[in-house]
Amino acid sequence: MSVPQHVAIIMDGNGRWAERRGQARTAGHRRGVEAVRAAVESAGELGVKYLTLFAFSSENWRRPQQEVNDLMGLLKFFIRRDLAELHRENIKIRVIGDKASLKADILSLLTEAEELTKANTAMQLIIAFNYGGRDEIARAARRLAARVSQGDLNAEDIREEDIGASLDTAGIPDPDLLIRTSGEQRISNFLLWQAAYAEFVFLPCLWPDFDRKAFEEALDIYQCRNRRFGKTASQGLALGT
């Protein structure tokens, strides 16, 4: 069985999960935190080396203020409750997204998580927070432009590799598999550059219901794909064989 090295997940459906049960959206987000714990555990057991979770997009700030406050509270709760356990499990945490505009208390927690686990080697948990794919590419472009302005780089010498090295995910392999829950079939400004050759799997289950069985279902679908990377079918890598 060929397990994808890097799995990225758009965790969608918390609000709808709660609304279908006549509960406040916050209840769905709380249940979603438990699904995060289960996904991290399943990824490690299944042999995934990199797991990227779309935790909070740069567009999510437009949601009602109370919901944003609840989400921030849940992030703090997750880190304070689970950081020690993740560290014991030898999991390295890395945060991607625009950190410059974050409030000091949130930034401090995220930095603490990265610093505590930076030497861990079992698996990398990448948390996309205050993240938007277009914003990430724009910030990478500004970094490259600054290097050109300083004379460290010629504009005509910029290659794809230079752009990749300027992204938040520098040093992380591109995702092999991108999963989205809730039945929606779009990537919502997530890993636009990195997902160029990812396999997409859209599952109907809402995120709070995402469990080991759903994870394995996505991997089973991935196994049946033929990843060609621009080559012919006979040259490509048939994962299901």
Image (tube, rainbow, N blue to C red):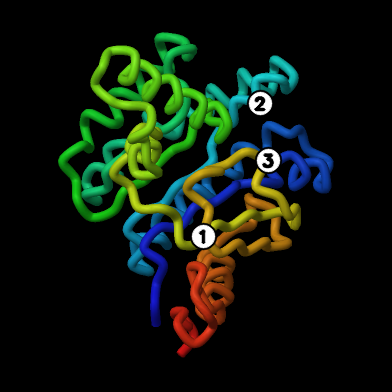
- Disc nearest the viewer among 3 and 1: 1
Q: Which residue lies at the image location 23% right of the left edge and 55% below the top edge?
A: 122
- Disc nearest the viewer among 1 and 2: 1
Instruction: Answer with mark 3 or mark 1, whichever residue precedes in sequence.
Output: 3
Quarter of the view holding residue 85: top left
- Disc nearest the viewer among 2 and 3: 2
Using the numbered discs, state the Cα–Cα distance from disc 2 to disc 3 in whole angstroms: 19 Å
In this view of the protein, which residue sits in the foreground, 144 or 206? 144
Q: What percent of the width, then of the height, locates residue 21?
A: 80, 46
Q: What percent of the width, then of the height, locates residue 221?
A: 58, 75
Q: What percent of the width, then of the height, locates residue 15?
A: 74, 39
- The vertical placement of 225 against 99, above or below, is below
The circle on residue 28 is 3
Classed neighbour count for the residue bearing mark 2: other residues with Cα under 10 Å, few (<14), some (14–19), many (≥20)? few
Instruction: Answer with mark 1 or mark 2, whichever residue precedes in sequence.
Output: 2
- The vertical placement of 110 against 37, above or below, is above
Secondary structure under badge 2?
Answer: loop
Left/right of residue 180 with respect to residue 212 in the rendered view: right
Residue at the farthest bottom position = 241
Residue hosting label 2? 59
Instruction: Answer with mark 2 or mark 3, whichever residue precedes in sequence.
Output: 3
Classed neighbour count for the residue bearing mark 1: other residues with Cα under 10 Å, few (<14), some (14–19), many (≥20)? some
Residue hosting label 1? 197
Left/right of residue 46 with respect to residue 129 in the rendered view: left
Q: Which residue lies at the image location 61% right of the left edge and 44% below the top edge?
A: 31
Left/right of residue 207 with respect to residue 219 in the rendered view: right
Secondary structure under badge 3?
Answer: helix
Q: Quadrant of the N terminus?
A: bottom left
Q: Which residue lies at the image location 83% right of the left edge and 41% below the top edge?
A: 22
Q: Which residue lies at the image location 74% right of the left edge and 19% below the top edge?
A: 64
Secondary structure under badge 1?
Answer: helix
Residue 76 is at least partly visible in this image:
no
